[in-house]
Image: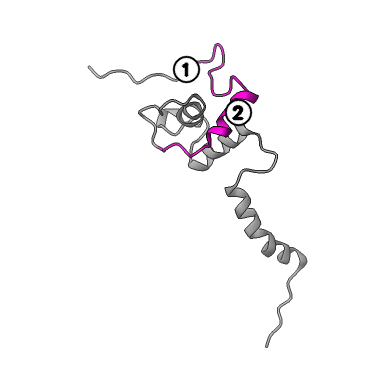
């Protein structure tokens, strides 16, 4: 039988690998409720600034979750599941989270076809 020697780093990688995978699926310790919403949206595939294609992080995911409204019709990815407790905690901690900033430009609405 042949012996295989593993370095300390290799042993740590083998042992930590499953823990890292579990941590990626669960909310990180110390992560606030609003950050959990952002993480859920990013994990679902929403991308910062990609609102024109229906995959926008804020317009197509965060805003509808926080406001409790339906997604825009152009949204291509379904909303991730976020507990009502997380949304309420986020609103309590940051009342304006998910609301447009004063003076911020709104994304263009699709123009009606003649």
Q: Residue furthest bottom?
A: 1
Asked if residue 16 lies in the magenta stretch, the reply is no
Residue 16 image offset from top left, x and y in percent:
68, 59
Residue 68 image offset from top left, x and y in percent:
47, 26
Which range is magenta?
77-105
Q: CA distance from mark 2 to mark 1?
A: 23 Å
Disc 2 or disc 1, which is closer to the eye?
A: 2
Residue at left 49%, top 36%? 46
- Residue 30: quadrant of the picture: top right
Residue at left 60%, top 47%? 26
- Which residue is labeled 1 in the image? 106
Looking at the image, residue 45 lies above or below residue 17 = above
Q: Crowding at label 1, few (<14), some or many (≥20) Cα neighbours within 10 Å?
A: few
| Image quarter of the N terminus | bottom right
Looking at the image, residue 8 lies above or below residue 32 = below
Q: Tag 2, which secondary structure?
A: helix
Along the line of sight, the residue nearer the viewer: 16 or 53: 16
Q: Main secondary structure of the magenta part?
A: loop
Looking at the image, residue 22 lies above or below residue 2 = above
Along the line of sight, the residue nearer the viewer: 46 or 35: 35
Residue at left 45%, top 30%? 60
- Which residue is labeled 2 in the image? 90
Q: Tag 1, which secondary structure?
A: loop
Report the side of 21 relative to 82 (left or right): right
Along the line of sight, the residue nearer the viewer: 97 or 109: 97
Q: Residue furthest right?
A: 8
């Amino acid at each position: 039988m042949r012996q295989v020697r593993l370095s300390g780093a290799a042993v740590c990688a083998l042992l930590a690998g499953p823990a890292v995978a579990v941590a990626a699926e669960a909310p990180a310790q110390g992560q606030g409720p609003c950050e959990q919403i952002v993480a859920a949206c990013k994990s679902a595939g929403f991308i910062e600034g990609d609102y024109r294609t229906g995959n926008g992080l804020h317009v197509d995911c965060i805003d509808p979750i926080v406001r409790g409204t339906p997604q825009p019709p152009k949204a291509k990815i379904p909303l991730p599941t976020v507990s009502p407790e997380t949304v309420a905690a986020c609103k309590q901690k940051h009342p304006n989270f998910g609301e447009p900033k004063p003076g911020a430009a709104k994304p263009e609405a699709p123009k009606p076809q003649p």
